[in-house]
Every structure is written in C-alpha cells, then in structure tokens.
Image (cartoon, grey):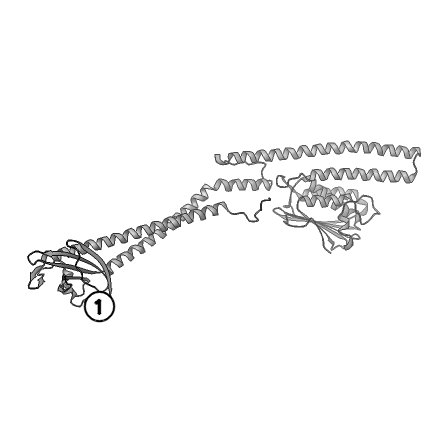
Amino acid sequence: MSRQVHEAPYSLRKRLVMAFGLLLILFLGLAGLVLDQAYQEGVEAAVAERLQLHVYALMGVAEPEDEGFFLPDLEEARFSQIDSGLYGFIFNRDGRELWRSPSALNFNLADTGFMPGLPPRGETEYGSLFTAEQGQLALASYGTYWENRDESYSFVVFESSAPTAAQIREFRSNLYLWFGALGVFLSIAQYLLLRWGTFPLIELAEDVSGIEAGERDQLQGSYPKELLTVTRNLNLLIRSERDRQSKYRNTLEDLAHSLKTPLAVLSTALQESAQAQTLSEQQRQEMAEQLERMDQIVSWQLKRAVKSNHNQWLAKPVSVSPLIEKILSALQKVYRDKNINLETRLDEHSVFHGEKSDLMEICGNLLDNAFKYCSSSVMVRVSGKGRSLLIEVNDDGPGIDEGKRHWVLERGARADTAKSGQGIGLAMVVDLVSAYNGEIRITTSSLGGAAVSVRFGKKGADSVSNVA
C-alpha cells in the first residue's frame, strides 16, 4: 500500500502551539471553575454563619411578654432600619407570628409563600426565597424550647442576597480579567519558548536549503545532541551520494573510451579497404554512416545512464552566462564563414542547479543547431531567479513546421537531412531537460526562424511542449 504524500506539510511549531494552547485553555478554564465554585461556596458558608449569629443575637435579647416577645436592645442596627435587607421573626409551633423586627414592617410574608415551620430543637435550617419587593433572600430558621413557658419557638432571620451576589459578580469579573491576562502572558511566553526550543530545527532546515541551493557542501551548524545523529547521517549520505555519482561518471567515461577505440579501429580499417578498393563506394559510404551512427548512439546511451543518476539537489549551482559565452566564442570560430550577427541578452545572476556537463550539453546542442541552420542572425536570451531558469535560442533560418515540432524531438529524427548529423543531439537535450523536470518548447522566432526555449524550476511542467 503506497503512502499518501501531502502537498502542504503541517508546521511542527504551529502544531505544538495549538496543542499547548488547547491545554492552557483547558487548564485555565478548569482552574477558573474550581476557584469560582470554591469562592461561591465560601461566600454561602459565610452568609450561613452570619445568619446563625443574627439568630443567636435575637435569642440573647428576647424577653417573653404576654403571648409574644419583647426585644428591647438590638445590637445589629439594620434590624431597626426599615427595609434594611435584614429581617427578624419569631414564630410559635403553630406558625403564628409572635414578633418581627422594625426593619420588616413592610415585609409581607403572605406574598413570599414562606411557610413557618418548627425545626428540631437546637438545629438550624437554611434556605432561600424570592420576593418581588426585597428580591432574593437567604434565610435561617432555628428551633428552640422555652422552659418557663413550656413552649417551642422558631427564630427566623432573612437577609438580602444582593450584596453577596454583587460580591460574587465582582470576584468573577476580576477572576476572568486576571485569568485572561495570565492566558495572554502564558501564550506569548509559550510561543517564545517553543520558538527558542525549535530554533535548532529551523537552523537545520536552513542549512539543508543552503545545500540544495549549492551554498554549502554539508551541514556544519552547532546542533543539540538530539540532532547530531540525524546531521551526521545526512552528511554521510551527501558525501556517499556525491562519491557514488563521481565514481559512476568516471566508470562510464572509461567505458565510453573503451568502446570508441574499437570503433576507431573499424573506421581505420574501412578507410584502408577503400584505398585498396576492396569495397565499392556505396558500400564504403553506408558502412561509414553506420560507424558514425554507432559512435553517436554509444555516446548518447552512456550519457543517458549518467544523466539518470543525477541529483540536482546535491549539485552546486552553475553560472550560466560564462558557460554560454564560452560556447558562443567557440561556435563563432567554427562558423566564421557565415558571418553570423549574434545578439545576446544574458542575466549574469542566472544559475543552473545541476551538473555543469549537462548544462553544457543542452546549451551546446541548441546553439550549434541555431548556428548551423540560421541564415545570418542568432539571438540568445538567458534569465532566471532563484531555482528558475529560462534559456531561449532564436535564429532566422527556415524554422520548423508546426506539424514536425514534436517529431524532431524524438530520437534520431531530423527535419532537414541535407546537413550532417544523425539527430541524436536534440533528443539528448530532451532527455536531459526531462531529467531535471524542465520544459522545452519549439515556437516561431521573432527573427523568422525557430525559437527553442528551455525552462527549469517550473513544477508540474511537461518535459516536451510545442507551441506555435
């Protein structure tokens, strides 16, 4: 089963930030809920304790009077202020009201739905109720027994919950504010720590990019011990791959020389046979053509084998302009009888990420064809940026018919059989361009002839494309 390759890989730093961010949100959220619940329970416990103290205060000053009670001295001033939010009541076992505090003069028990009951002796019952006028109220009801009257009573205290609710709201507001600020601070600190912690990985990625761009030969940074094994193995892989390519190339070059020697011997023998007139002129010419074709095919096939093992990511960048100028200088000497008008537009900063011999093979074949088939003018353009490179060769020759443009790029095909050559060169260019995931196009030149352009660094391009 093949593994799926993701077009856009995820960011390790972003993944960690999201994971720790989610963990931070969960932690702060749970901590906030726990603190809020604890504070609310603490406030409720404080309210219950305060109500219990108010009940004890009422019991401490209560004096029997006829069938009711008289409370002459109330220490809590709010019991004496009307609608103060603190209300006291005394009920008998039948639920009949025997006393209420001055603060409860406007307190209508009938509207609250409160049913006075008698709690067990010495125990306090807590509760809450809501009224339209007083709002939410907390209550405490305490059951007691009066010995000199042989009667049981309940002391009930109501207190408004508005102050405690406001206190809880203020606490929550401050809690959210501080936890929000803490979350922002921890998020920033977490990002900075992750950035600092993953910096060696970023440095490693930049060093690998430097190797791909040809700016360095191997990884030379100071890496933590967790990455030393990775960097050491990468350097070993790079060195072994380059050594293998060099050894492979040298072996094939030796093989090429070994094969060319017997071909040279056969060619010499053919010439001697021609001089001895043991062969007819037609036989000699056919054998000479086949020997030349064998020599070109051997060279082409060997170079294809070398090309198939090229690694453009490990190769050093090659400056294109000096190489093309060198080729043009040689071709001007070869074709000096044609007195060719040469126009060049070469970007000095353009580089080719690959083997220098491959670039020389591509440019040499394209320029040689342009010089060979032109009438009097050749124009060469080179431009590029980063890993992108465009080489365009124009001539004012007869050009190539649109119907033949794909055909001439095939092995051994030629649009013109009048000139020497077996058509192997352009097919080699196609193979080399394809090996580097490049694109070759044949169009009509502005000079009137053929325009052949080669582009590298364009992902997903077809290796051969013909445009009118």
Q: Residue at x 66, y 35 (%)?
A: 245
User: Is residue 227 visible from the viewing direction of this image?
Assistant: yes
Taking 2 as reference, is 17 left or right? left
> Total marks drawn?
1
Type of amino acid under label 1 = Asp
**Residue 146: horizontal and vertical position, in percent?**
9, 57
The C terminus lies in which quarter of the figure? bottom right
Q: Residues within 10 Å of mark 1 (few under 14, many from 20)?
A: few
From where the camera sits, is residue 345 visible? no
Residue 123's image quarter?
bottom left
Camera-side residue: 113 or 129? 113
Residue 436: give x, y in percent of width and height. 66, 44
| Residue annotated with mark 1 | 111
Observer-nearest of 352 and 174: 174
Please indicate whether residue 161 sits to the left or right of residue 445 in the image: left
Residue 84 falls in which quadrant of the image?
Answer: bottom left
Rendering coords of residue 442 (x, y %): 73, 52
The one nearer the camera, 287 or 355, is: 287
- What is the quadrant of the N terminus in the image? top right
In the displayed structure image, the side of residue 165 where residue 261 appears, left or right:
right
Secondary structure of residue under mark 1? helix
The vertical placement of 214 against 144, above or below, is above
